[in-house]
Image (tube, helix red, strand yellow):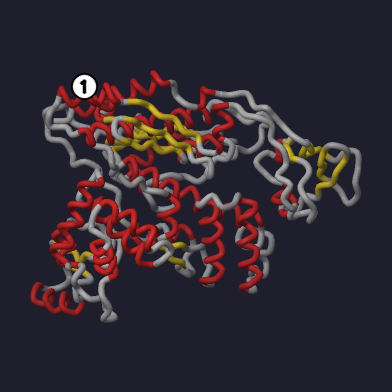
Amino acid sequence: MNLTLTVAGGDQIQSTMLRCASLTAEDVANEARAYVEKLTQDNFLAYGSSHKNKLGGTTTNYWLRASQASTATATGSDITIVVDAIKVRGIKRHYTGGGTIRPSGKISEITGKPIKYLTIPINAAAHGNTVAIMQRLGVNLYRRGSVLVAQSGPEKSDSDVAMFALKKSIGPQTPNPAILPTQNEYYDAINTAVDELLDLD
Amino acid sequence: MNVPRAEEYFRGKRVLPTELRTREFARLPLWVKEQSFFMAGVMDAELAGAFQRAAQAVLDGEMGEAEATRIIREGITKSGYKPEPGQEGTIKDLTTVHRQLINLRTNVALANGWAADARRRTSKTLVAYELVRGNIPQEPRIWAQKIWPEAVAASGSKAKPDRMAALIDDPIWLYMSDFGVPYAPLKWGSGMRQSPIPRSKAREYGLLPPKGEPQPPPAKPPESLNSTLEVAADQIQPEKRKETMEKLDGLAVFVKDKLVFTDPNGSRPWPVPVLGNLLPRMNVDGTENYQKRALREWRNLGGDAAAMRAMEKEFSGTDLLDDWGMLVRRVTTAERLQTTTALVDALANLVSLVL
């Protein structure tokens, strides 16, 4: 589900119009839109550059992709920010927190049976990968209790490393409002847009 | 205002079989790169098409990376592709998941980069980009100390070597790109991104002259895929130009010393008066201009805002709707329209010129 947030820019846009008659409402709204979009994108970039994934694996560029998936549109004096969940799955859940996630029950490409478990990476090498991708990378995964381990030699052994935990469900996720700017920061961005417009020669 | 979208941009690309490698391809004109989907050294259009469909599916949100590689695997099987002897298992082997994922991620990232850049160019006051980090890389590169100052010196940039910022149209962005395009991802895997900055900050960074002095022209608005399609025509003698124009039958016009493609059925933005001359011309195969036909359908549906919505319903899934979409976009961009009312007025004006 998309992450959507609306900022009301009515008062600021109206007061700008009174200060500069040559600007149209569309001029001001579009400029405010661009600054709100920039602020959202910059916030995701700053978050991504200060939060390492817990497993220490190669980055999946999740926050960088969130930045690219953020757009703002102006409708009248409202500015709506949408972070496209198609491009960054689970983004709304990060912001608002969420309920329990369970397996889809779809037919597994690997086993040919309905999916019963979520596979949660527990090793840096598994971070950002799915079981299907790892198998295609040549990693032989097998189940040991409630984990999937990677076979390191020709035979299974005790030294084989656990890659994924098998979970019937996970959650609920704690909300993290810090991934988006605050309403006050958005208002400041709109003010900056207005100031810059008024400063045009 | 229409928001430029990565998936729509990518859908407009056509497969270009080529023997060129990535670095050679990057030297081609921007319009070739933006209009074509190519893969280093892949001459089989069917095979490249499978990679393109996979990236499109990811951009459309229809599937994740793992699922999309299935489209690639099917394409490889169908084409009968086999890696060159000695290249099995290397990055040049298209059957390896490493190669498939790199290709997929690169194409998705470039399409997203184009859309972000196009959206930013609609602002009147965000005039420059600052390079910022968007992730924590495994091996950070020395951007501020080495990569940026070297690029400033080598690219003819007007940016300062000690501040990683430059005007949006500065040549440094194109120079720094591994892919020969002026938007992210500039250096693959670097995690560096362009953050737009306002005029006041650009002035503070020394990128703009002080207030009151002549300012550089604003950044170009979002460009169509055909906007840079032109050839230098200074070799063509003035007396030969008329003959050339006749042969081209409106497909291109001379603008100063350049022969510029008019893109009669495409997306290149032209103001209404120019379209008024362009659309009445027949296609080279003698058929009616496709966008003229779409314009007529819109007029027949009422020629108003309601007719715009009716077009989508009436012609859903047809080529005519694509033609209509391109016409609307090129008018909106060229005339810098921001409201539906203004667009309807512009199209009504075009109807009076064309139909």
| Drawn side of residue B262 relative to residue B54, left or right | left
Q: Which one is nearer the viewer's eye here, A187 or B100?
A: A187
Query: Residue shown at 54%/28% (left/top)?
Result: A95
Chain identifier of the residue bearing label 1 in the image: A
Residue B125 quadrant = top left
Q: The residue under label 1 is which amino acid type?
A: Ser
Q: Which one is nearer the viewer's eye here, B67 or A153?
A: B67
Q: Is residue B303 above or below residue B237?
A: above
Q: Position of residue A82 (x, y in %)?
A: 44, 36
- Count all numbered tags in the image, as a single digit: 1
Residue B326 quadrant = bottom left
Q: Quadrant of the C terminus of chain A?
A: top left
Residue corresponding to mark 1: A15
Query: Residue shown at 45%/28% (left/top)?
Result: A43
Q: Is residue B315 above or below residue A119?
A: below
Q: Position of residue A133 (x, y in %)?
A: 69, 50
Q: Which one is nearer the viewer's eye here, A23 or B144?
A: A23
Q: Is residue B159 above or below residue B88?
A: above
Query: Residue shown at 38%/36% (left/top)?
Result: A72
| Drawn side of residue B213 relative to residue B300, left or right | left
Q: Residue furthest left?
A: B239
**Secondary element type, mark 1:** helix
Q: Residue furthest top?
A: A184
Residue B288 quadrant = bottom left
Q: Quadrant of the N terminus of chain A?
A: top right
| Drawn side of residue B33 relative to residue A61, left or right | left
Q: Which one is nearer the viewer's eye here, A28 or B216?
A: A28
How many C-alpha atoms fall within 10 Å of the one at disc 1: few (<14), some, or many (≥20)?
few
Q: Position of residue B63 (x, y in %)?
A: 59, 52
Query: Residue shown at 81%/41% (left/top)?
Result: A148
Q: Position of residue A176 (x, y in %)?
A: 56, 24
